[in-house]
Amino acid sequence: MPSIRIPPNIQELIIEYWNSGSSINDIAESFQYKSLEIVKVLKGAGVKLGSINRPTILDEFSSEALEAMVNEYSNGMEPVSTIYARYEISLDTLYRILNTLGVPRRTANIEALDAKKMQMEAAIEAYQKGVALWKIELDTGIQRDKLRREMYKRGIPLRTMRESVGEHTYNHHPRKPRTPD
């Protein structure tokens, strides 16, 4: 396949993006070219493609912020999603930072897993007592689909819509019988 010819003004922008710290994949996505084409432009301009003197993800944060991030992750008290949302980064970026700093991945918190199991048991028990799935989801935070899958695994039959209508309807009102006109 012949090489795509990238106009000189775009080549200059690509080099500028590279020098400002953008990755090859980010540049390729921005300009709608393949990564290989971006590499060819950079090599053709004599740019060294190693990571020497390139800004890293760590340069974007103060040492205090990095230390706080590591402490929050290491103590295991907060979900990872809360940590990366607080710093307005992605999950991948958080793990890249932690890997760069040599922070070991934390293992599953046994108490949290036990609490989730107990929460699932309580949710299933509530369902068997007649509580609607949407109400269980609101009360426990367990998604309806997850609860349905767990009940299917355990062989617990799901109620039909007709069986669900009653005191636990969505609008919180019991169904009124129709009167003939």
Image (spheres, helix red, strand yellow):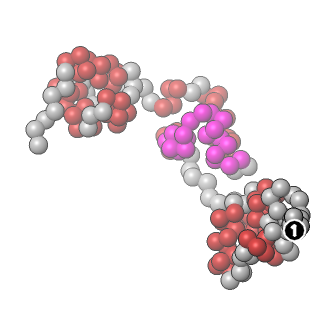
- SS for callout 1: loop
Give the image quarter of residue 171: bottom right
Q: With 151 as the anchor, is 18 left or right in this view?
A: left
Name the image quarter holding the C terminus: bottom right
Identify the residue at image location x=51%, y=31%. 58
Residue 165 painted magenta: no
Report crowding for label 1: few under 14, some 14 to 19, many 20 or more residues within 10 A (C-alpha): few
Give the image quarter of residue 160: bottom right
Q: With 83 as the anchor, is 169 left or right in this view?
A: right
Q: Amino acid at mark 1?
A: Pro
Name the image quarter holding the N terminus: top left
Q: Position of residue 8 (x, y in %)?
A: 19, 18
Residue nearer the viewer, 123 or 167: 167
Residue 7 seen from this side: yes
Give the image quarter of residue 89: top right
Q: Which residues are drawn in magenta?
A: 78-96
- Please tell me whether the stretch drawn in magenta is mainly helix, strand or loop: helix
Q: With 92 as the anchor, is 5 left or right in this view?
A: left
Identify the residue at image location x=30%, y=33%. 32
Residue 94 painted magenta: yes
Identify the residue at image location x=39%, y=25%. 21
How many marks can you see?
1
Residue nearer the viewer, 153 or 55: 153
Q: Position of residue 29 (x, y in %)?
A: 35, 34
Q: With 173 as the anchor, is 118 left or right in this view?
A: left
Above or below 102: residue 33: above
Of all residues, the one furthest to the left in this rendering is 2
Residue identifier under label 1? 180
